[in-house]
Amino acid sequence: MVHFQRELINWYLKNKRDLPWRNTTDPYKVWLSEIILQQTRVDQGRPYYERFVKTYPTVKDLAGATEEQVLNLWKGLGYYSRARNLHKTAIQVKEQFKGVFPGSYNDLLTLTGIGPYTAAAIASFCFNESRAVLDGNVFRVLSRLNNISTPINTTAGFKEFSTLANSFLNKEDPATHNQAIMEFGALQCTPKNPNCKLCCFNVECLSLKEDVVSARPQKLKKLKKRTRFFFYTVLCDYEAKTVFLKKRIKKDIWQNFYDFHLLELNEAESFETIKKERKTIDKVHKLTHQTLQVSFVMVDILNNSYDLNDFHPYTYAQLENLPLSSLHQKFIEEELLFLG
């Protein structure tokens, strides 16, 4: 165990990336980076982190923003419940903890949107509490090193790997250890085609000995993605160079985002039927748990009668300040050239 801890940290000190959230023990900035990097690559998440820190330097600043402002800064990053929870947590820290993040793992768990992994990361990085982090990188390193076949996305798997991660943890320097094992998984023990010949643990790696590296970690198969059919009518005023949108109030991943006029169809046949009647622009938009078959039709409101209740006109400049889904953002940039 001591050998693993020593070799891991030696590897980390030689290979770690220079990332802005590693140069601070400010729990606000560490928390912000962890929420942004959930389900997001570092190169994609880094610009968002830097924009958030610049716009909201402290948790009090973030708490003082509106949800719409937070969603707008987050747009394009996906998994929008993270942005909503980010805002709720900031308000909670301001109101319940006087704007100061709690300094222990157990107290951090009381905050909205902070689970065991994020709490362990903040507690160890900022307060040097001996709590092992357990993210996808750590699951992968430990499952390969020990050749564990228990599915990681099960209750039994989480308990087994939590125990194992804490047994491997360097209690004297948990902050560096946790950073190191996550970085090792991200750079060396990668999901596909890891360079095992150059790995400092290739002698003791049980999965390598059994030639099952590519089969670790194990996961239970997820349910098949749901397919939904969206028909958008894009209401335009070509003379005024505006497009009409309304705020989406339905409680789903796009709540409080702005939307074109939407008709959702229940089946592919109905969707294809309505498409035949119009000149449409077709897109496929893939999300984690669903695939969207999307058609847009552009309509000039001056030549058509539409109920514009709850819809408002926006210029291109005004759209910049609205929270929009990546689907809408891309459509506007590619198809609504008259707005520019």
Image (cartoon, helix red, strand yellow):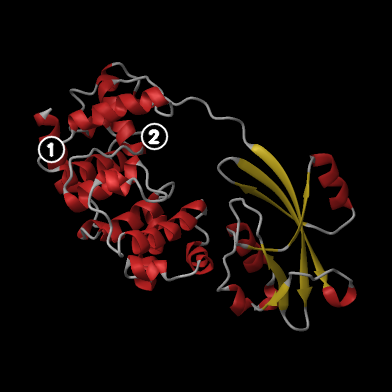
Question: Which x, y percent locates residue 323?
Answer: 57, 65
SS at mark 2?
A: loop
Q: Residues within 10 Å of mark 1 (few under 14, many from 20)?
A: some
At a point 30% along the width and 16% down the height, the residue shown is 210
Residue 205 left/right relative to 158: left
User: x%, y% of residue 50?
Assistant: 35, 66
Q: Is residue 215 visible?
A: no
Quadrant position of the N terminus in the picture: top left
- Residue corresponding to mark 1: 171
Q: What's the residue type where badge 2 is placed? A: Lys
Q: Is residue 81 left or right of residue 30?
A: right
Q: How many marks?
A: 2
Mark 1 belongs to which amino acid? Answer: Lys
- Measure the alpha-carbon separation of dots 2 and 1: 30 Å
Which residue is farthest top? 210
Is residue 154 placed above or below 40 in the rendered structure?
A: above
Among numbered discs 2 and 1, the one appearing first in the sequence: 1
Residue situated in front as seen by the camera: 91 or 318: 91
Instruction: Say which residue appears at 72% left-offset and 63% top-offset.
Output: 260
What element does badge 1 sit on?
Answer: loop
Q: Quadrant of residue 172?
A: top left
In x, y percent, where is residue 275? 84, 52
Q: Could you say which disc has been placed on residue 289 in the image? A: none
Find the residue positioned furthest to the bottom: 240
- Tell me residue 167's x, y (percent): 19, 28
The quarter of the picture where the C terminus appears is bottom right
Q: Which residue is mark 2?
A: 192
Q: Residues within 10 Å of mark 2 (few under 14, many from 20)?
A: few
**Residue drawn at 32 percent across, 68 percent down:** 58
**Where, by quadrant of the figure, is residue 153 drawn?**
top left
